[in-house]
Amino acid sequence: MANSASEQAPAAIRVGVLGVGVMGYNHARVLTDLPGAELVAICDPDEVQRNKAAGMLGCAAVGSLDELLALGVEAVVIAAPTHLHHDIAIAAIAAGLHVLVEKPIAPTVAEGEAIVAAARARGVALMVGHVERFNPAVEAISKAIKGEEILSIGITRVGPFPPRMSNVGVVIDLAVHDIDLICHFTGSHITEVQPQVKAAVAEREDIALLQFRTANGVLAHINTNWLTPFKARTVHVATRNKYVIGDLLTRQVTECFDYRPDGSYSMRHLPVAYAEPLRVELTHFLQAIRGEKPPAVSGEDGVVSIATAIRCLEGPEAAPAVAPTLVRAAG
């Protein structure tokens, strides 16, 4: 006799969320109804903030990792400020918890590498929250350029100054997304950086024009700032045979192909699935915990991204901070 559906379904993974700012709250919101997950509690040292969020989400609220552990969580999402990532992640991993840590993985390469090493030694899943990887438009672009010889990538990520931001500039806050996407699209790592950064109206850099060359010869650039009065998120990829344009906000992807001597070409809009990137990301995290597939964005990926971002801030003469062997090629 066949087992019932309830007997076949794996037990829900008990998850806690550390840090309930904008991103942490959204993680918790998605986890409340994500199949295969049980949101056990949210955690934040700010009692007013955590109780307000818990009231909206209908879940428990605690003030420390120890209290989360006492509730029997198996995994945590770390959405605390970046400078706290290392200490929280190391403590969670030491307790045997699986960890999804928001980007960037840590403020320094050394701290990021320590998190990776701890997770490997403890045998727990570690994933980094580069949520743009799970944007359906990014998936459509990836499919369009699969098997193509990529020549160049241009990414624009601009918008107004975010009031919440105070401890980092645009390179760490915004460009790190696109550094990760360049490595993801090319299946390679960045070997050369030519950065131009400036603090025009903020204390830290609020304009960055970044140029790169990858190990497999792709030229790439990122234009990012906090000076544009509207948000724009676009990706342009030139290959030997086509030109792909993606808008990551509207999720429209267009492919130009079949170039002719008279300068004409063909164009088509590509299908883009509907999905909430954060929900897809958390689903991948659950799959990694269950051993069904490796983490979609590994700890090593996260270290490579922050290492390249730091090189951009230190200048082109800075030596690569991470060995190329850390990079796992995009699937």
Image: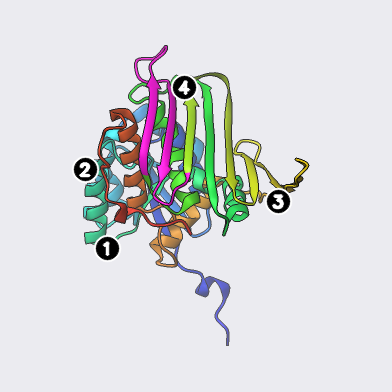
**Between 215 and 271, which is closer to the camera in this rendering?**
215
Mark 1 lies on a secondary structure that is loop
Mark 4 Cα within 10 Å, few/some/many (few <14, many 20+)? few
Q: Are marks 1 and 4 in contact (CB under 8 Å)?
A: no
Can you give x and y, in whole percent of width and height, for residue 310 in the image?
Answer: 31, 34
Q: Are marks 3 and 2 in contact (CB under 8 Å)?
A: no
Dot placed on the residue nearer the N-terminal end, 3 or 2:
2
Question: In this rendering, which labeled residue sits more in front, label 2 or label 4?
Answer: 2
Q: Which residue is mark 3?
A: 271
Q: Which residue is mark 1?
A: 123
Question: In this rendering, which labeled residue sits more in front, label 1 or label 2?
Answer: 2
Amino acid type of the residue tagged 2 in the rendering: Ala
Amino acid type of the residue tagged 1 in the rendering: Gly
Can you give x and y, in whole percent of width and height, for residue 254 in the image?
Answer: 69, 44
Dot placed on the residue nearer the N-terminal end, 1 or 3:
1
Amino acid type of the residue tagged 3 in the rendering: Pro
Query: Alpha carbon of mark 4 to alpha carbon of mark 3: how far?
Result: 32 Å
Q: Is residue 58 visible?
A: no
Q: Is residue 132 visible?
A: yes
Q: Are marks 1 and 3 in contact (CB under 8 Å)?
A: no
Mark 4 lies on a secondary structure that is loop
Q: Quadrant of residue 212?
A: top left
Apparent side of residue 80 relative to residue 230 in the rendered image (left or right): left
